[in-house]
Image: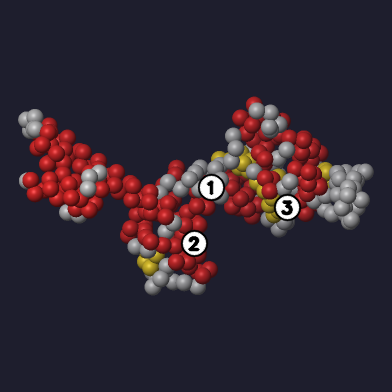
C-alpha cells in the first residue's frame, strides 16, 4: 500500500487519464479523491458518477449536457458532468458498464478535450481530468466486444491496482481502531475496549466486500455497543459464523494431529481403543464440554455418555 500511495502521488501531477483497478469495496473512489487532492486541480471540482447507475438512454445527456428542445422533456438547457467538472477531475466509477456507443464519444472527448451537448451545433472546450475505475477485467471485456480497445489503451497508460483487503492482512488490525474511532466520534460514543472474541473474529474474517464491508461491520458494532465496549455479539452474523468455523477447524486439526502422533508412537491399537482415544482428545480440546464434544463427534449426547461410562 505504501508503494501504491507513492505511485499515486507521482501520477497526481499529470493531467493524463488514469485507471484504477480493483474489486468492489477496495477504496477506488477514495484513491481518486486523494489523487485529485494532491493534484494541481485540487481547487477545482471533483465530480463522481457511477456509470452503472445511469440508464443507457440518458447517458449522453448526463455526460455532455443538452440544449433546450433537444428531445421530448428537454424544457431547458442543462450542463453535463464534463461541464460541471471543468477545471477539476471527473471520476467515472465502473466504467466497464458504459455502453460501447458512448465509449466512442468519451474517447473523442479525451482526445479533442471538447464535448458537444445533445442538440447543440458546436462543440465546447472542457478542461477536465478523467479518473476511471472498474472491478471488471477490461481485457476480457474487449475480447467479448463490450469495451473498446482504443479507450482501454488510452486509460491504461496510467493505471493502479488497489489490492483486496485479504492481501493486506497487516492493514486490518490498523483499520479496526481507526474505524472504531471514526464511527464512535460520529455517533457521540466513547468505545474504551473491544472484546477479545470480537477482535479475533474481525481479524480472522476474509472480507469479500473489502474495506467497505469492514467499515460497515464496525459501524454496526459501534451502533450496538453498550457500556463503552464493542462485543462479539455486536458483529454481523456472517463474521461471527466464519470465526466459529475457523476455531472448530483448528480444534479438529489439533485432535487429528494428536491422534497421528499417538499412532506413530504405539503399536497398532484396536479400533475400540482408537475410538476411546479420539473421544478423550476431543473432550480435552473442548475443555470438558460434553455438549460441544458430541457436536464435534457428530453423535448424540446420550451416546457420548454411554461411551464414557464404558471406560
Q: Nearer the viewer, mark 1 or mark 3?
A: 1
Q: Nearer the viewer, residue 227 or 22?
A: 227
From the top left corner, tell me how far across and down residue 52 is, in percent: 67, 45
Sequence-first disc among 2 and 3? 3
Q: What SS does tag 1 mark?
A: loop
Specify the label residue 26 is tagged with.
1
Give the Cα distance between marks 2 and 3.
Answer: 32 Å
Q: Are marks 1 and 3 in contact (CB under 8 Å)?
A: no
Which secondary structure, mark 3? loop
Number of marks in the image?
3
Left or right: residue 252 compared with residue 79: left
* Mark closer to the observer (2, 3): 2
Q: Where residue 169 is drawn, which disc sits there?
A: none
Neighbourhood count class around disc 2 (C-alpha, 10 Å): few under 14, some 14–19, many 20 upward:
many
Q: Residue tagged by mark 3? A: 88
Display coloring? secondary structure
Q: Distance between the residues labelled 1 and 2?
A: 17 Å
Q: Residue at x 68, y 52 (%)?
A: 48
- Report the residue at 75% width, 43% height from top: 56
Q: Can residue 111 be seen in this view?
A: no
Q: Position of residue 65 (x, y in %)?
A: 83, 49
- The answer to whether 306 appears left or right of 8 in the picture is left
Q: Where is residue 287 in the image (x, y as percent from the top left)?
A: 19, 54
User: What residue sits 16% from the left and 38% below the top?
Assistant: 259
Judging by the rendered image, the residue that carries numbered circle 2 is: 219
User: Can I make out residue 140 in this image?
Assistant: yes
Above or below residue 105? Residue 285 is below
Q: What element carries label 2?
A: helix
Q: Is residue 256 left or right of residue 10?
A: left
Sequence-first tag of 1 and 2: 1
Amino acid at each position: 500500500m505504501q508503494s501504491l500511495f507513492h505511485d499515486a502521488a507521482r501520477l497526481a501531477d499529470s493531467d493524463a487519464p488514469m485507471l484504477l483497478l480493483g474489486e468492489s469495496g477496495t477504496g477506488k473512489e477514495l484513491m481518486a479523491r486523494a489523487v485529485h487532492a494532491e493534484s494541481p486541480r485540487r481547487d477545482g471540482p471533483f465530480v463522481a458518477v457511477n456509470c452503472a447507475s445511469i440508464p443507457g438512454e440518458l447517458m449522453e445527456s448526463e455526460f455532455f449536457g443538452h440544449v433546450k428542445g433537444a428531445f421530448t422533456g428537454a424544457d431547458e438547457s442543462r450542463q453535463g458532468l464534463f461541464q460541471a467538472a471543468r477545471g477539476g477531475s471527473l471520476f467515472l466509477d465502473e466504467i466497464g458498464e458504459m455502453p460501447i456507443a458512448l465509449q466512442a464519444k468519451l474517447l473523442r472527448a479525451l482526445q479533442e478535450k471538447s464535448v458537444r451537448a445533445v442538440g447543440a451545433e458546436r462543440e465546447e472546450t472542457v478542461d477536465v481530468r478523467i479518473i476511471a475505475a472498474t472491478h471488471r477485467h477490461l481485457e476480457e471485456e474487449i475480447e467479448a466486444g463490450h469495451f473498446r480497445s482504443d479507450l482501454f489503451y488510452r486509460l491504461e497508460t496510467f493505471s493502479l491496482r488497489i489490492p483486496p483487503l485479504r492481501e493486506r492482512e497487516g492493514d486490518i488490525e490498523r483499520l479496526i481502531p481507526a474505524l472504531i474511532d471514526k464511527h464512535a466520534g460520529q455517533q457521540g460514543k466513547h468505545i474504551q475496549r473491544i472484546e477479545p472474541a470480537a477482535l479475533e473474529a474481525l481479524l480472522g474474517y476474509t472480507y469479500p466486500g473489502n474495506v467497505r464491508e469492514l467499515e460497515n461491520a464496525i459501524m454496526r458494532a459501534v451502533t450496538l455497543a453498550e457500556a463503552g465496549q464493542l462485543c462479539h455479539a455486536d458483529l454481523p452474523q456472517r463474521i461471527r459464523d466464519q470465526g466459529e468455523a475457523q476455531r472448530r477447524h483448528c480444534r479438529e486439526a489439533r485432535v487429528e494431529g494428536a491422534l497421528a502422533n499417538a499412532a506413530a508412537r504405539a503399536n497398532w491399537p484396536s479400533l475400540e481403543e482408537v475410538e476411546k482415544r479420539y473421544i478423550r482428545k476431543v473432550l480435552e480440546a473442548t475443555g470438558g464440554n460434553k455438549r460441544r464434544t458430541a457436536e464435534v463427534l457428530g453423535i448424540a449426547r446420550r451416546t457420548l455418555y454411554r461411551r464414557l461410562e464404558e471406560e
